Image: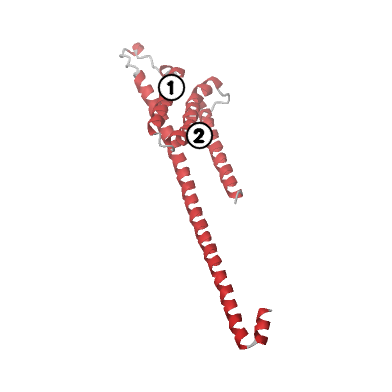
């Protein structure tokens, strides 16, 4: 019975490892098919999955089990909000969004230069992304906990049924012994030879 939970745990770890490996490899695909990888650009793009990794496992391993499962919803939400805002600030400061936007030379063509997007647009994008990751982590952890709870309930029902069956058997055995003794008692009165054979 211990082998099955161990295999399930190992499968869960494997799925997590493969998923995050794919996420961290994805920025390498943004190099445009160049033979030489721009590691500075890769590290800049990797900050996003790294912050997602932090908020995912902060919820999965710490916040959900310690606060949400113990009915401390207010602390859970406040700590989540604090983590999300902090990581969104890290993303915002580590990215220079305006440097990544190509800016054609409109002035040389006699055209007015269009305004740059506001900083709050990038800030909002980071917040929404991190909230989505936190929600996804919470949903996965809650579904796993619900599945474990269902298994424990089924196991408890099975153990209860087995205990009731054992109790019923223990009640039946004395009745069988009592009936046998009553039969022998009756045989003693009728035939001592037959009763001795029955006792033997």
- Residue 195 x, y percent position in the rendering: 65, 83
| Quadrant hosting residue 36 | top right
Q: Which disc number belongs to residue 182?
A: none
- Residue hosting label 2: 61
Instruction: Kindly indicate the quadrant of the structure image that contains residue 146.
Output: top left
Mark 2 vs mark 1, foreground winner is 2
Residue 145, position in %: x, y?
47, 43
| Label 2, label 1: how far apart the Cα atoms are | 19 Å
Write the residue at 52% across / 37% down.
19
The kind of secondary structure element at disc 2 is: helix
Q: Which residue sits at x=39%, y=17%?
A: 104
Q: Are marks 2 and 1 in contact (CB under 8 Å)?
A: no
Q: Residue at x 53, y 38 (%)?
A: 16
Looking at the picture, does residue 195 appear above or below residue 6?
A: below
Q: Quadrant of residue 126?
A: top left
Q: Which residue is mark 1?
A: 86
């Amino acid at each position: 019975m211990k082998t099955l939970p161990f295999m399930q745990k190992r499968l869960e770890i494997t799925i997590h490892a493969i998923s995050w490996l794919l996420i961290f490899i994805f920025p390498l695909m943004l190099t445009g098919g160049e033979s030489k990888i721009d590691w500075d650009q890769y590290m800049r793009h990797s900050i996003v999955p790294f912050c997602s990794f932090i908020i995912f496992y902060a919820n999965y391993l710490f916040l959900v089990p310690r606060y949400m499962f113990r009915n401390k919803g207010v602390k859970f939400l406040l700590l989540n909000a604090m983590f999300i805002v902090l990581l969104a600030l890290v993303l915002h400061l580590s990215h220079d969004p305006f440097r990544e936007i190509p800016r054609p030379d409109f002035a040389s063509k006699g055209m007015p230069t269009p305004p740059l997007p506001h900083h709050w647009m990038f800030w909002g994008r980071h917040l929404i992304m991190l909230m989505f990751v936190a929600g996804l982590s919470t949903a996965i952890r809650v579904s796993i906990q619900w599945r474990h709870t269902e298994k424990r309930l089924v196991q408890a029902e099975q153990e209860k049924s087995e205990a009731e069956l054992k109790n019923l058997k223990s009640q039946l055995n004395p009745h069988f012994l009592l009936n046998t003794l009553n039969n022998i008692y009756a045989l003693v009165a009728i035939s001592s030879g037959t009763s001795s054979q029955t006792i033997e």
